[in-house]
Structure formats: structure tokens, C-alpha cells
Amino acid sequence: MNIERNDMNASNPFVVESPEKLAPNELVDLFVEKFTKIEVLKERKHTFLWGSRGSGKSMMLRYLDPQCQTITHGSIAKALERERFFAVYCPCKEGQLNKTDLKLLSEDARSVITEHMLILNVLDTLIDSMQRQFPQYHEEWSSFAEHVINLFDRASIASSKAEADITEDLSKKPLGWLRELVAIENRKLCKFLRDNALLSGRADYQGVTSGYHDFLLPCLKSLQKIPGLSSVAIFVLLDDADRLSDDQQRVLNTWVANRDQSTVCFKISAQHNEYRTFLTRGGGLIEQPHDYSEIDTDEVYTRSKSDYFNKVRLIAERRLKIYNVKTREIKEFLPPDPTEEALFQKIRLATEKEWEQSQGPGRKQDFMTRYAKARLFQRLKANKQRKSYAGFENLVHLSSGVVRDFLEPCYLMFDRCIEKGKDPQLIASIPPGVQNEIIFRYSEDFLILRFKKIRKDLPVEQWTVVDKLATLIESLGRLFYERLHDPDAREARLFSFTVHGTISSEIEEVLNLGLRYRYFQLRTYSTKEGGGRLKWYILNRLLCPVYKLDPTGFEGRISLTPEFLKIACENPGRFVQLRLKLSDAVPKSKIDFYLTGE
Amino acid sequence: MVAEASLESVADKGGLSTIRKGISDDLFFVCASFEQRTTSAAKCLAEDYRAKKAFVYYNEEFISNRETARNLQKLCTVLRPKCDVTDEVAGSLIDPKKQFMALRKAILSLDLDSVKAVTVDVTTFNREALLVLMALLRNNCKSARIRVLYVSPTKHGEWLSRGFREVRNIIGFPGIQRGSRSTMLVVLSGFEPDRIRKLIEEHEPKTVLLGFGDPPTERQFLDRNIEEQKTVLARQNVERFNFPANGIEKCHRILTELLSKYLFEYNIILAPMSTKLSTLGGYLTVEAMQEIQMTYCVPSQYNVKNYSKGESHLFMEEMPMRPKDALTKSRSDLDFPTRNTSCRSPK
């Protein structure tokens, strides 16, 4: 079943809006600084902000925007004094910078035009922001505008200056005039792209060009002469930089390689696998930590002591407060199933007793962590009872490190309560039954409808890769289910796998597709034998309800050979059968274990 | 003014003659596709119709399809006796540069100053190729009269296309965007809501204006248009408007009136996804308002077997002449400026 959102419901505290559509005060209200690693973003370093769609990248960047910082600190002066940065939010929108017309240019021309286009974009947003924040400094802006004009080639900029004079008065509105000048240059650039494509002759470029060293850097340095900005760095926030072409990403990397962080820092957000190059235009490589720091907003660990868990709790409770919901604690608002909780407590006690009687193996807490939850699943199966995934903790686990995958199901749950006739003002908690109903469907959609969407997103020739990914997920889901429900299994709560050996490009394509669409998260870990790190693929826990798996943490990982992976991509039944046989044959001591390494 | 008639009545009156009575057209341009109606207009040409040159465009991805190959042959067979030279032009649906360069090469091979009368059968062009072709014609054959022929089908298939390859701006229509402005997506919608959803997902507009083709080329098409776009219309920040899908200039007038209100507030992106006539209405609007970008969502798969059926009406309309102030002159001997960075004009 496809769950359709009812966007008309404005009283739903879990509504997810694109950060661009939020007014600054709404954004500040909804944003929670704690546990987001925003301090790293505020440092005077170039930073890459990685994360899936919906993981909160744009929210973090938008929060640094002067309009939001002014609200947070009370005034722009206080914000600058405390934070010592002035941010310019530049989203890389589809078609705005990555224009198809650029493909018709030679490599050299494309490189120059693309850099100039990026600079004009930054400049337009910067001036807009400065106009809004510092309308009072007339003299200073006049000097700034003069300085900027002088950075351009005098002859090349002359016609644009004359044109700008017609619409704006430099002596009266220096920033307005400068913005008009940027707009005129932007028009010239786009006209060149159009003429170059459409006209029979050789198109001539009638605008100026600008680069990092000869324009952007001195321009931003001259901003430091404005009162209040003397010790302030400009943060250029480039959101969704994965939309940029390879050439454009190389331009950005070249800027990053310059390390002029006292004047300008680039904060670049992208989906990890979609940012295609770290090469500069000169062929150099930018590297972490020398050239930039990085933040990953996709979290792997979701247990109750993790930053992610606490971040989601604060976000959710902030929303309950803003929307004036009676219950202010999210754990109360999203209660677990009481019957299952009671059963689990019983099983925990029995497991504890079992350890105490035999005084082992291992530590009591580890023994209970490893077996109690698995036994709950086994008991429920024996009783033919459906596992409940209700409760705040479960829902945080299921969101697999992406805040939107927590908020969306909550939105639908709240909406379902309204559909059932409840007054939104009187909803004090979501009954476990409603939570389960929605989260099962959400999980099912992630498995079934999402694959349909992926097929639509990809050309026909890649559909076999999509089919293989679906089969691989099915194989893993079934194998992990068998493990979890086997009373004799020691590694019952398996949820991830590593690959030993060299995989074919075909299988690599399948795994990469899984990463792109978040069916897996990728981490690495050092091999026990030493000598390098192995890729470690963790299944998205949103799949737990549909495969009846345990979303709370993960223990151990299965190691798969390329041959096994190939079978997993083709035949789930055979894969499960062979893998279970193999596990039986392997001595327990050989199983690659670790205890909740979170 | 748009003229509309059934194909039978056109045939009964002796078929379509040249643009200028008794004088050959300089160019006839048509696209061969897998649809039955791809040959309809060409078959309606009068016995004495003549053109100096004919180009039959096709997308190479479809040429392995038997119907497309057969239609290409049919078109060449119909046109060869009527045209001094008939050439095939192989473009690409997937590769925008290849598509563009194929059309550009064809147009620039003509003696541009002598091209005064062009007939374009727009019926089965993919919209991207059509817009590129029209831009090339109007920018290079500036004194030419361009007559557009369009044949509407009697019925469309249950689905027209599936999946997406990419969303990209159409070459020649980059628009002029400002970083500090929000995006408005304007869609001339047809029967493909998934492609619109993809456009919304990729462009992330603040506002969407969703256009419905009213009046349509055939009455039943409007009902389906409304039905198909219900879910898109229900989304937040989506507003409805109507545009005439059955005429170029009247569609252009409506769009101009609508979009001029937003031109200095938003970065406007136009996605023509309705009839070819309204696509050209969109073309005229963007020609006059070059701030607007044209976007295209390349589908992954077409319903080749059952895209459309039959041939209902022939629409004929002449493109208005370009206003003089919109003409852009080329100063071919000037170079790229050399200070700041050294970049030469491309080639």
C-alpha cells in the first residue's frame, strides 16, 4: 500500500518541510543544535557535510545563514561577535549551475565560464544578504563597490557599469548598484551560452571573467573592512554540490585546496557517493584532514546513549512543544506495546537467572544483551504473535540514522489518529496499534514501492541491477530472520556483512546501488589479521518490520565471499540454505564477533 | 492563426500546398518515430508540393525498432519525389550534445540567407529536439516563414513513458538565474504525472504552476489530463492554470501574461509536456523572456508499441516573425576577454 501524505494538515507536529521553504524563525524554532556536530561546521575550516537526503544537511547549513543567526543571538552584531563568521547560503539547484549548454564548450572555456558562473552566484547571494543585514554602512559599501569594480578588467566591465548606472545609482545605493552589475554580467554569460549554441558564427563573450585569486578572495578580504566584519570569515555554504558537474566540482576542490580559511571557508554538502571527484583543476587531490574536515550526518549507531538518539529526542520534543501537544516527553508520546514489554521483562529475568546459575559465559550484561532480545523474537514466533515495533526507541532504531525516516512515520501516525476522529489538540500519545500499523506499511513501502521508484529513476539497461539488489536484500533478510529465530544460534542478532575477496564489477554495481538508495550503510573496520580495512555493509533497519528482525543494535557480522554474494543476488533460497549449512560447519570460535561496538 | 481540419478534408481539397503559392518551400523538416501518425502530414502534401530540401530526423535509440525504421523509409519515399534533396539526420534522445549537433549541422548546411519558407511537421518530434530545431531555425534563418504542421492522434496508450534517465535544461534555453531567488516550476502538463514528480524532485521549486491543456486538441484529452494530474495538483505549493493546447500563438499569449508577473521574483523553469503546439507556444514565450529556462525530463522507456493510435486532425499554424529587438547578432571575429583568466571562445 502506498501511504499518501495529507499535506493539508498543518497541525501535525511532525510535518517535514524543505528547509528552503521554512521562514528563518520557523527554521530556528525547529532546529536543535545539540548532537548535530554543528560545532565542527562552525570551525574555520573547509568542511564537507555528507549525508543522505533527509538527514538534515540543508537544515544545518540554513541554520548558519545570517537571518537565522540573528534570531538565535538576538542581533547580527552579537552573532558575528560570538560566532565570527558570516554565512552565504548558495544551493546548487538543478539547471542553475550545471547547464547542459556548457557541454558545447571546450574544456578550457568551460572551466573559466563555470568558475565565473559560480562566483557570480556567490556574489549575488552575498550582496543580497549584506543589503539585508547592514543597510546602514553607506560609505563603507561605496568603497567596497568601488573595490569590487576595480577587480574586474576595466575595459570589459565598462559596458556593464554603464548599464547598471541606468537602473541604480552607485552613490546612493552602492550594494543595489553592485547587485545590478552582477545581474548584468550573469545575463551576458547566459547570452553567450545561448549564442554559442544557436548562432551560426563564432559567438563572442562580452562579459568579464573572474577567478578565485584575482576576484573572489580579494573581494571577500575587502569585506573585512566593513565595521563588525573585521575578524569575520565568510562561510560559503554550497548545498547539494553533488548536482554540480565534474568540472564544477573540480573548481570547488581547487578553491578548497587554497586554505585561506581566515577569509573564506567553503562548507560543501553532498550525498557521499554522488560527489564524484576530489581532484583539483591542476590534477592535485584534496585530502582530509589537511585540506578539509568532514561531517557525516548519516548515523550508524542509534542506541539510547548515542548522539543520534538524543538528537532525535530533542528534535521530537521541540516539535511537541512548538505544536503545544499535551505530552512533552516523546517516550510518553510514543509508548511501546505494554504486553510485549512485560513479556520481554520476563524473558530478561529468565536469561539473567540462567547466567547466574551457570556463572557464564562472559559477562552477565553481555549475555543478556545477546540472548534476551533474540529469545523474545523466538517466543513470539512460537506463540504466533506479531512483533511490535512501537515505542520511541524502536522508531529511532528503525530510522537508521536519518531523521526524516523518524519524522515521516510519526507524521503518518499522527495523521491516522486524526483520521480516526481524534481532535489534534487532544492527542496525547499514539497508541501502539497505530504505530505498528504505520511502521509496518512504511517498511513494506521501503521494500516494495521504493524498488518501483528506483526502476523509474534508472534507465532500462540498469533494471537488472535493481532486480539483483532486491534479491540480495531478500536473501539477507531471510538469512538474518533464520538466525534470529534459531534458539541455538549464538550470533542471533546479525545485521551486517563484510566481503572477503575481490568482487566483480557487476556485484559492486549492486552494492553501490544499495548504498545510493540507502538499503545499506557503509563503514570499514580493521581486519583481525591486520593489514588494512574491510568494507562493512549494514542493512537499513527500516527493513526490520518487514523481515521480522531486531532493530536494536547489531552484533557480529557475516563474512561473505564474492561467490556467496553472487548467489545472494540470484537465489535467496539457495543462499540461505548454503549459508546456514556453512555456519553449522564453522566452529563457533571462528565466527567474526564483536560486542555492540558502538 | 491556427487552422484545423480533418485529414480527409485536407486530402479532398487536394492536399497541402507550399507556403508561397507556386514557389517551392526551401525546407521540409520532419521526425520519423514509432507512431502511426508520423507519416500522416507528409502523406497529405499536395501532388504538386515541392521543397528544395527535406530532412528526416530520427533518434538513433529508436532505429532498431521496426516501426521507426519502416516509417523512416516511408517518409523518405514520400518526400523524395517532392524534394530536390532528402537527407536523414541521426540524433539521439539520450545524448543532448549529439542531438543538438545533428540538428545544428543540418541547419547550418543550408544557404541560410536564401531560406525563406520552411515547413516543419512537428507531430512526432521529441519535445527537446523540437525546441532545439525551432531555436536553430529562428536564430539562423531569420527572414524565413516557418509553417508548423501537427497531427493529433485519436487515442493515446494507457501509458506513454516510464522511468527517467535524467533531468536537464534544453541546450539553447539556459535561462538566467539569480542565486538569491527561489525557483518556480511551470509545467504544461499532459498524461505523465511521474515525469512531473521527477521534475519537482530535481528542481525543488518553491512554487509549481501546473497547466492544463484547455482547450485541448481533442475533447477527451482534457478529461484524461485532469485525471492523470490529480495527485500532482494535490501537493502543497501547486497552483493550477489553463493554457490552450491547440494553438501556438494563443498559448504563447496566455503564458506571457502569466509569467511576466513572476519574471523578476523567481527563477522560472518551464517544462512543456503537453502538445507540440503548446510546446511551441512555450518556445515563443521563452524566446521573448530569455530569463526562463526550459527543462526536460528524459524518460527511460517509451510505450513504443502503443504510444498513440490513429490520426484525427491536422493543425497548421505559421510561427510569427521574430521581433527585431529579440534578434541577437553574432560578431564572429571578436574573442573572449583575456584579463582575469584567459579563455577563448569555444570551438
Image: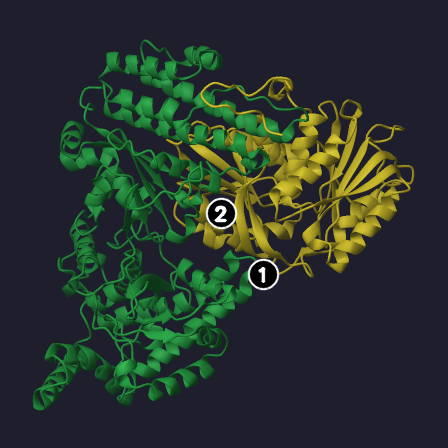
Q: Toward which corner of the image does residue A250 lie, by quadrant?
A: top left
Graded by Cα atoms within 10 Å as few (under 14), some (14 to 19) or many (20 or more), the crowding at tag 2 reads: many
Residue drawn where x is 29% and y is 63% of the image: A400
Front residue of A596/B295: it is A596
- Kindly identify which chain the residue marked by label 1 belongs to: A
Give the quadrant of the N terminus of chain A: bottom left
Q: Secondary structure at mark 1?
A: helix
Q: Secondary structure at mark 2?
A: helix
Left/right placement of residue B110 relative to residue A186 reads right
Quadrant housing the C terminus of chain A: bottom left
At horizontal 30% and vertical 24% (from top left) the residue drawn is A220
Tell me if residue A465 can be seen.
yes
| Closer to the camera in the image, A274 or A448 | A274
Front residue (pair B16, A286): A286
In the image, residue A185 above or below residue B347? above
Q: Could you say which quadrant of the image residue A278 lies in?
A: top left
Q: Chain of mark 2?
A: B
Identify residue type, mark 2: Leu
Q: x and y percent of residue A319 in the render?
A: 20, 52
Label 1 Cα neighbours within 10 Å, binned few <14 / some 14-19 / many ≥20: few
> Which chain is assigned green?
A
- Where is residue A112 shown, x and y percent of the image? 48, 29
Residue A396 percent across, percent down from the top left: 24, 63
Amino acid type, residue under disc 1 in the picture? Glu
Q: Picture coordinates of residue B221 (x, y %)?
A: 62, 51
The residue under label 2 is B199
Residue designated by label 1? A461
Q: Residue at x 15, y 80 (%)?
A: A368
CA gap between label 1 and label 2 equals 22 Å
Say whether residue A408 is left or right of residue B323. left
Specify the colour of chain B.
yellow
User: Quarter of the image holding residue A492?
Assistant: bottom left
